[in-house]
Amino acid sequence: MQPKVFVTRALPEEGLNILREVAEVKVWEEELPPPREVLLQETAAVDGLLSLLTDRVDAELMDRARNLKVISNYAVGFDNIDIPAATRRGIMVTNTPGVLTETSADLAFALLMASARRIVEADKFVRAGKWKTWGPMLMLGRDVYGATLGIVGLGRIGYAVAKRARGFDMRVLYYSRNRNEQAERELGLEYAELDRLLKESDFVSLHVPLTANTRHLINKETLGLMKKTAILINTSRGPVVDEKALYEALVNGDIAGAGLDVTDPEPPEMDNPLLQLDNVTILPHIGSASVATRTRMATIAARNLVAGLKGEVPEHLVNKEVLEKLQK
Ligand code: GLV
Ligand code: GLV
């Protein structure tokens, strides 16, 4: 009998076809994620789950899904999954790192530049018929070239952003759990404790995963350390930033602007006051959203799932501890 797989949204066909070769595949075709009850119901009898960052995969779901062997997340981040709960139950969890690194770094840099040069605001200005003439004081922004960039979290994506910054002759500071002296040598980066990074940077870009330690890492206090002229870029996870504190900081002029690809929650409530601010650019979590990268993510997520179903060790296994459990 073929294993059963549930895919929580329509993905590029390349990935679905890989799954269909070995499994009975059901795909949730709606635009919105499956509601909680549907997700619990659809996963109750499956062997494999292909989940998105919009699906909460927790102990309750795992307890109901008695046959579940592998959860393949279509993302590099996996904060939507209770990893210890999966490990305890002998369920493998996989993600899609690597393939989205450069695409995500492109987006972070695009957001940085858009925020610095007020691209979105300027476009709206033209469309609203407000552009009367060339003006010496019109839409003045901030230089990216030669500025200081502070990268918080020097994983693959943070590193790729630093590479881009070099082309703009930026001075790049980074803060990370571990120092990376090789990256310092390769890219001329300078390690700084978070406080110093925040104090000295013109742009601060966040590239940490969401964990208990990084939740609200950017808060009233840390925002207070930033320059009044600084711009915050968040392409990681919304809850890394305390949005209320961010709003206050922007309104009070404690920092100059923000570029957000992620919010808390997603999407933001329409009465979220951040949406009223001209010095904030907000995108709908599109960091990895290029045609080529989303196709590669689908292929990799499918391969991870298939490997797990066959009892092999998937290439991008997140919870390696689960292997001990499975050998017992
Ligand atoms: C997107 O945010 C991801 O984690 O892949
Ligand atoms: C993602 O690829 C990261 O580790 O930053």
Image: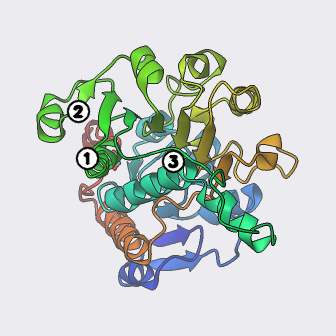
Q: To which quarter of the image does residue 207 belong?
A: top left
Q: To which quarter of the image does residue 274 belong?
A: top right
> Quick one: label 2, few (<14), some, or many (20+) residues within 10 Å?
many
Q: CA distance from mark 1 to mark 2?
A: 9 Å
Labels 1 and 3: the sequence-earlier one: 1
- The secondary structure type at the circle numbered 2 is loop
Image position, residue 294 (x, y; %): 43, 71
Give the color scheme: rainbow, by chain, secondary structure or one colour.
rainbow
Contact? badges 1 and 3 (CB < 8 Å): no
Q: CA distance from mark 1 to mark 3?
A: 19 Å
* Residue with the mark numbered 2: 189
Q: Nearer the viewer, mark 1 or mark 2?
A: 1
Q: Nearer the viewer, residue 71 or 207?
A: 207
Q: Nearer the viewer, residue 159 or 277?
A: 277
Residue that extends furthest to the right in the rendered view of this protein: 271
Contact? badges 2 and 3 (CB < 8 Å): no
Q: Nearer the viewer, residue 280 or 26?
A: 280
Instruction: Count the labels in the image.
Output: 3
* Residue with the mark numbered 1: 166
In the drawing, what numbered circle is on residue 268? none
Contact? badges 1 and 2 (CB < 8 Å): no
Is residue 183 visible in this depiction of the protein?
A: yes
Judged left or right of residue 248, residue 232 is: left
Task: Tell me which amino acid carries mark 1.
Answer: Arg
Labels 2 and 3: the sequence-earlier one: 2
Task: Tell me which amino acid carries mark 2.
Answer: Leu
Q: CA distance from mark 2 to mark 3?
A: 20 Å
Residue depicted at 23% across the width and 24% down the height? 179
* Residue with the mark numbered 3: 235
